[in-house]
Image: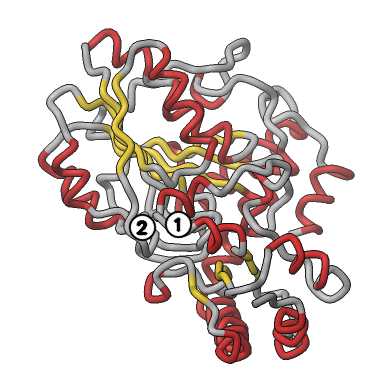
Amino acid sequence: MLAEVLLFLQDEYGNAGSRTHSYGQRAKQRVNRAREEVAAVVSAKPDEVVFTSGATESNNIAILGLEEAGTRTARRHIIATQIEHKAVLEPVERLRQRGFEVTLLPSSADGRINPDDVAEALRPDTLIVSIMAANNETGVIQPIPDVAKVLDTHDAYFHVDAAQAFGKITNHIVSSRIDMISISGHKLYAPKGIGALVVRRRGYNRVPLTPLTIGGGQERGLRSGTLPVALIAGLGTASIAAMTNHTVWRDHCLELRRGLLDALKPLNADLNGDPEFTMPHTLNFSIPGVDSEAAIVALKDIAAISNGSACTSQSYDPSHVLVAMGLSQKRIQGALRFSWSHLTELPNWSAIAERLHHIRTP
């Protein structure tokens, strides 16, 4: 991936919007190939891929971009969940402040939403349903295929924030009933600062999005600005690598997960999230008597861990995800989030568990 990025930073520096010379033409060809590579992961068409700066921007376009259409058609009801990333919850809140009605669905204690709750919340004026594919704090995979079936009989737009899932779980976000999919490049080892919004067509009709950035008309008018060809090339390459190596990478992550679970058994750790529906590279847990801040300090020389997502690590507020799951205050205060990848060598789980044991309080 790095070699591909460097090629378009150092040697091929053409603007993909320039059609009059070979430099621009080669840049455009690489961008078009990246569209094909990204689209293949979710069974979309290449011209349905809109490149953005990442999942945050994609989520904003998908949600705020529907404001005008919702107002014009008097469909001003939004459904999301209480466990969404702030990049979904805050745009939804912005529309609530502008007069839209919002239903935030609850989570079970295991961190999953119930598709039946989606069915019950639907109204004739529901404009959009936004549900993440997998949670960024717990790693819990949401029942996206089941929600898609619920929406088969309703014309609300279905948006899936797939930042955590794209390229890591297969056959989960490929349904043609999903209208929009948000993608973050750095989650699959592409450069930071690149992502995409897949905007599927219904027949010949596109989702009626109003662009948030104007002045150039790039990306079929949905996202103006000169395309960062090097970053796009990196995302395309990373997408293909994730598809090609999916099974091997998944199995490696599962092996690491089993090792951590075995090491935690003597500590009677409580898993925060349904273990049957959790991403192979993430584990959120609490150990009775262990404070998360103390654990982070105790492990800082052998492991880089957190007590929440990187996006909210500067906040001292309790995790809104774990609160929505109904966990006790002590369990939330002790929650630790471990994550790894196919690049992670076997950690010394025993040493980590031993240190956690030593900082336990009665």
Image quarter of residue 223: top right
Q: Is residue 159 above or below residue 241?
A: above
The location of residue 47, given as percent across then percent down, is: 44, 37
In the image, taking residue 126 as reference, residue 226 lies left or right, namely right
Give the residue drawn at x 54%, y 79%.
269
Regarding mark 1 in the picture, which secondary structure is present there?
Answer: loop
The location of residue 115, given as percent across then percent down, is: 22, 52
* The N terminus - image quarter: bottom right
Image quarter of residue 358: bottom right
For disc 2, the marked residue is: 142
Give the residue drawn at x 45%, y 44%.
84
Do the residues under discs 2 and 1 have CB atoms within 8 angstroms?
Answer: yes
Regarding mark 2 in the picture, which secondary structure is present there?
Answer: loop
* The C terminus - image quarter: bottom right
Residue 134, numbered label: 1
- N-terminal label among 2 and 1: 1
In the image, taking residue 197 as reference, residue 287 lies left or right, namely right
Label 1 sits on what residue type? Ala
Q: Count every numbered label the image shows and give the total.
A: 2
Residue 12, numbered label: none
Give the residue drawn at x 78%, y 66%.
304
Q: Is residue 17 above or below residue 319?
A: above
Image quarter of residue 16: top right
Give the residue drawn at x 62%, y 42%.
317
Label 2 sits on what residue type? Gln
Q: Residues within 10 Å of mark 2 (few under 14, many from 20)?
A: many
Give the Cα distance between marks 2 and 1: 6 Å
The location of residue 207, given as percent across then percent down, is: 33, 27
Point out the residue furthest to the front here: 362
Q: Residues within 10 Å of mark 1 (few under 14, many from 20)?
A: many
The location of residue 330, given as percent across then percent down, is: 55, 61
